[in-house]
Image: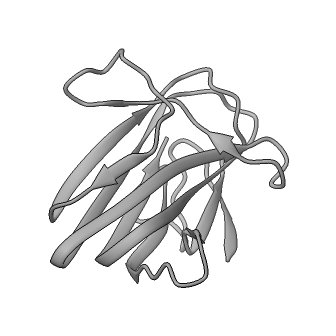
Amino acid sequence: MATLALFPGQTDAFVGAPGSVVLCSALAVTNGAGPQDSTNTARRGPAYNGGAVAIANTGGATPTIKVDIQGSMDGTVWYNVPYALVATPRTFVVSQITLTTTANNTYLLQELAPWIYLKLVFSTTTNETITATVFV
């Protein structure tokens, strides 16, 4: 797993768009050994701006995946980061996300939430391929 620097407006070889880091691309998530982390971890530095995580999942037969958006101040101790759905942008939760159909979803990250590192953790997975990007 790589840790990639992420700053607002940044553009370099690691990002797909200014201020973004691809957390995983066409990752075939398997759950045989327990929870699985995203391929990359984003590092945004000490900024406390909001942001978004875009998740595109492609499911096979009876797809199911559970996703935690996790942050850390030190890259060692991880916790769920507050996010909101686009339809309810000021209703933040830290609960696990369950995806059961092929879809593209955007989750808004709460501003002022303390995290420097961000990753996704996948569990309870059946027949899923995931692409995810974080934006600040």
Q: Pick whichever, 129 or 64, lies toward us.
A: 64
Q: How many marks?
A: 0
Q: Pick whichever, 132 or 5, lies toward us.
A: 132
Judge whether 93 appears above or below 7 on screen: above
Judge whether 78 appears above or below 93 on screen: below
The coloring applied to the image is one colour
- Residue shown at the point (36%, 15%) measured from the top left: 90
Q: Is residue 44 left or right of residue 133?
A: right
Judge whether 58 appears above or below 52 on screen: below
* Quarter of the figure with residue 102: bottom left
* Quarter of the figure with residue 4: bottom right
Image coordinates of residue 13 in percent, x first then y, are: 54, 74
Image coordinates of residue 59 in percent, x first then y, are: 20, 74
Which residue extends farthest top? 90
Asked if residue 18 shows in the view, the reply is no
Image coordinates of residue 2 in percent, x first then y, are: 68, 74
Q: Is residue 54 left or right of residue 20?
A: left
Q: Is residue 88 left or right of residue 23?
A: left
- Residue shown at the point (61%, 82%) measured from the top left: 33
Q: Pick whichever, 110 or 67, lies toward us.
A: 67
Asked if residue 133 shows in the view, the reply is yes
- Residue shown at the point (80%, 54%) measured from the top left: 75
Q: Pick whichever, 124 or 28, lies toward us.
A: 124
Q: The N terminus is located in which quarter?
A: bottom right
- Residue shown at the point (52%, 30%) measured from the top left: 82
